[in-house]
Image: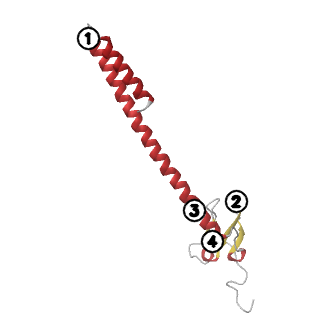
């Protein structure tokens, strides 16, 4: 039983001991005490829900930590620079990196910073042996 529920029970006991002669006052007092009891019960349910949600969030954080650790072990935190081509966007001037699969794409390259199409020539591609 929560602190609030205990206080409501105490008020209920006090009201029982008063033995009010005025029936209207007794009904109002009983109504107030019942309302307080309902509020106390709702607060207890919300506290339980908050505790459940907190446990779920803690579990999610633990799972994310496990995933992050697994990725760190697989990735070792370093990129293999040979797999990426560094390009300076002619529109925004930002340096962006594309992998070989992106360069071979028929859709072209889109700068992730300014969303403009990047066109460039890669040495050795599209040149004939006579050049």
Mark closer to the observer (1, 2): 1
| Element type where label 1 sits in the image | helix
Which residue carries the number 4 mark? 74
| Element type where label 4 sits in the image | helix
Residue 118 visible from this viewpoint? no
Which residue carries the number 1 mark? 24
| Distance between the alpha carbons at the discs numbered 2 and 3 | 38 Å
Q: Is residue 49 above or below residue 63?
A: above
| Distance between the alpha carbons at the discs numbered 1 and 3 | 63 Å
| Distance between the alpha carbons at the discs numbered 1 and 2 | 78 Å
Q: N-terminal of the two: label 3 or label 4? A: 3
Whether label 1 touches label 3, CB < 8 Å: no
Q: N-terminal of the two: label 1 or label 3? A: 1
Q: N-terminal of the two: label 2 or label 3? A: 3
Nearest the camera: 66 or 84? 66
Q: Position of residue 92 (x, y in %)?
A: 70, 59
Q: Position of residue 10 (x, y in %)?
A: 38, 21
Whether label 3 touches label 4, CB < 8 Å: no
Looking at the image, residue 42 sits to the left or right of residue 74; the answer is: left
Mark closer to the observer (3, 4): 3
| Element type where label 2 sits in the image | loop
Which residue carries the number 2 mark? 92
Which residue carries the number 3 mark? 66
| Element type where label 3 sits in the image | helix
Q: Position of residue 98 (x, y in %)?
A: 65, 71
């Amino acid at each position: 039983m929560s602190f609030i529920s205990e206080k409501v029970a105490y008020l209920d006991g006090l009201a029982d001991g008063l033995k009010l002669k005025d029936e209207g006052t007794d009904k109002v007092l009983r109504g107030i005490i019942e309302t307080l009891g309902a509020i106390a019960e709702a607060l207890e349910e919300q506290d339980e829900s908050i505790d459940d949600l907190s446990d779920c969030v803690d579990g999610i954080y633990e799972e994310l930590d496990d995933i992050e650790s697994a990725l760190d072990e697989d990735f070792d935190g370093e990129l293999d620079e040979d797999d990426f081509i560094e390009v300076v966007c002619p529109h925004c001037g930002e340096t962006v990196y594309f992998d070989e699969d992106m360069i071979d794409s028929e859709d072209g390259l889109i700068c992730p910073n300014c969303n403009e199409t990047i066109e460039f020539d890669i040495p050795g591609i599209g040149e004939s042996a006579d050049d």
